[in-house]
Amino acid sequence: MKRISKPLVIIAAVLLGLFALVRFVGSPVAKLVIEKNSQQWIGRQVEIGSLSVSALTGNVRIRDLRLTDQSDTATFASWQELDVNISLLRLIGKQVYLRHIHLTDFCINVWSDGERFNFSDLPQRFASNDTAAVRDTTPSSWRVSLNDIRLRNGNISYQDKNRNQHWDFEHLRLDVPGLEFGAGQTDAGLRFDLPDNAGQVMLRGAYDMQSNIYSLIADLSYIDLNFLLPFIREHISAGGIDGWLGAHLVAHGSLDDVMGVELQGNVQVDNLELRDEDRKTIAEVGMIGVGISSIVPKTMNIRLDSLAVDSMILNILRDKTGNTISRLLAAPQTPETVVTSDTTAAKKTPETSDTTPLRLSVGRLALRKSQINYTDKTLSRKFSYKVRAIRASAQNLTLDGQNHIILNAGLPDGGSMMVNWRGSLDYKNKDARVVAMLRNVQLEGLSPWVEDLFAYPVNKGILSLTSDNSLSHGIIDGMQKIEIYDLKLGRKDNRSEAEFKSVPLKSAIALMTDMSGKILIEVPVEGNLNEPKFSLGKVIGRAIGNTLLKATAAPFVAMAQASGIQAGDLSQMPVDLIQPDLSLEQYKKLDLIAQMMTEQPDVTLNMVQQFNLKSAVETQALFNLKRSYYEQQTEAIGSITLLDIEKIQKISNSDSGFKHYAEQLTGKRNKLTAAAVEYYTPDSLQQQVLHKAEMRNLVLTRYLTKQKDISEKRISITTDSLQNLTQYKGQNRYEVIANMRTDE
């Protein structure tokens, strides 16, 4: 038999049999026959209040019908009245032509247990026995025309036993002008209202019987999102949802390949409010608009013309157990995913297969007039922060391609934020670069976060941040440039368990602040974003903490950097072992050290004179020999001046007059330095070297205490031990060491 002919013949046979049964035996007998044999015919019990048939007009009216379920104990379907009018003459021409089908007060009770429905037996009972693998596409010679289909006051009760959900669709209304089968393409229209004024659905479809190709247009109007909550809860842990959904969707496909359907159209959600399981509002959105170019579920190919989000307010709460977003996106636990303690219990899981990767593209992305309210209860003090006026835009956005996304936002008290993303959104497997800038951020609003790290509240301060980060396969490599102006801290909380509580923050901040009141910190950031415990905020905080620790450990380095001076210029001061005083260059450096100590009263100074003792003895012996020669030549008597010392140091070892004088005085030829050491004796020379070193220490001490008013308690100027001087191999110098008092 050709395709669809068997169902149509069954319909024709039932109608003709019904007419014949009533015509020859009468309506009461026909009613009894149907009720008695319904179990055999359809596997369910039928009860009929009254049945009447007009053979002349082709009208059939069945009142007060009740159809039980398979158990014969509950009602599956019922109606008050079914009125059908059929053209009997057209049956001769192989056409089932129904002029009208009117159904009033129709009720149906449907349930599903996840594997079957309570009507699954009906299609199987009337299924064709034809097991041929190839579908017969030969057009059927039968035609079916259904006209003026009306359903009034329909009620459908649906129970999903697997999800433990129940819906009642009441006061349903159905109006279908006509359906045509068996003559090529079939067009149909359908409109019905969802229960409890939850919206209206209008469907228009076309179906070609020969090719099995269809198209369907769906218009959804004012769909109450709360009606969809049970389905939404299958994907997110939502406690409630409000809002209205509207859509115009067009589907094209073939019944031979259901997943190959292509969807186009547009969807809009208005006045969305999403609540968590504690009934607290997580998100409010004025409007979400999606323009769909093409969605093909089979290939996981989604192409959107546009995605617009307007007036969104997102409330994020972070506490000891996580945050609202992670809890919302966590898959709700269902009976199929519960793991019992019985290891032998079978767990329901679908058969796994290779998944098709998602391919997503968005022609235009726009986020406007949005806001994020962030609250953190994991800190020692509640932290709340509001990011407002958020707007973002992107063109031709894809998951794995090169994208350019720009985001701007306003921060409290006039602050601003800008994020510029270039590269792939799939940062776990691809490369990207993100540059972020914060400007005019009032640090007082960030005080709880600072307190949690350093145990100090922030009373005042302005921050600017430039963050440049490269992302490669989930690894971040970046540099954060932080500028802070006019920073003022409150009193330290000594009871705090802050991570960097031991850092003398006030002193470190003072050390790093330049003359204009600015602090500059450059913080490198590295890490794996894929690690669950990775936190960019913690990494930056830890890096800042380490920077402050280094500043307090080497305060002159921090002060030098804040003043634009190279750190090496303050960490040491060269020493001329022959000069009893300091040079102008040394005094200049000493002035700078004194200035920094005056500005930072918590800094203490330790200067240690270092030189190689053997080399110093030889230098002093050679100087003594040249001085003796100089005094003989100039007939100098008594002490010598700094100018004399410079002239003496300029006498060359190869000077013939000096060499002749040295040979006569020491009685030695060659090895001039060794001869000088032997002549003046090593012990005498060592005492002379150490005496000069002590004189330099006194000069430095007097200058800092008398001329620069630095307290002697903050200064320690010494010469290194004899043991260290004997082993020392570096340049002659003062090692300048600054320390910070930590009793803040």
Image (cartoon, grey):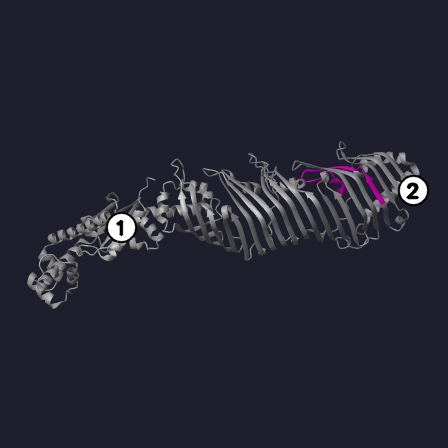
> Does residue 105 show up magenta in the picture?
yes
Q: Residue at x 67, y 49 (%)?
A: 267
* Left or right of residue 733: residue 465: right
> Identity of the amino acid at label 2?
Ala
**Looking at this rendering, what residue extends furthest in the top direction?**
73
Q: Residue at x 12, y 54 (%)?
A: 685
Q: Nearer the viewer, mark 1 or mark 2?
A: 1
Q: Position of residue 618 (x, y in %)?
A: 15, 57
Residue 507: name its quadrant.
top left
Residue 736, numbered label: 1
Looking at the image, can residue 296 be seen? no
Q: Residues within 10 Å of mark 1 (few under 14, many from 20)?
A: some
Whether residue 373 is situated above or below residue 68 in the rendered picture? below
> Identity of the amino acid at label 1?
Val
**Looking at this rendering, what residue extends furthest in the bottom direction?**
656
Q: Residue at x 23, y 56 (%)?
A: 731
Q: Position of residue 675 (x, y in %)?
A: 10, 60
Q: Position of residue 353 (x, y in %)?
A: 60, 48
Callout count: 2
Bounds of the magenta span? 100-125
Please name whichever residue, 530 or 35, is drawn nearer the observer in this view of the structure.
530
> Does residue 700 show up magenta in the picture?
no
Whether residue 64 is situated above or below residue 707 in the rendered picture? above
Q: Quadrant location of the C terminus? A: top left
Which residue, given by chain and number where applicable, does mark 2 sit on? 55
Q: Residue at x 66, y 40 (%)?
A: 226
Looking at the image, can residue 419 be seen? yes
Q: Position of residue 499 (x, y in %)?
A: 40, 41
Q: Residues within 10 Å of mark 2 (few under 14, many from 20)?
A: some
Please name whichever residue, 377 or 88, is drawn nearer the observer in this view of the structure.
377
Give the CA separation, mark 1 to mark 2.
120 Å
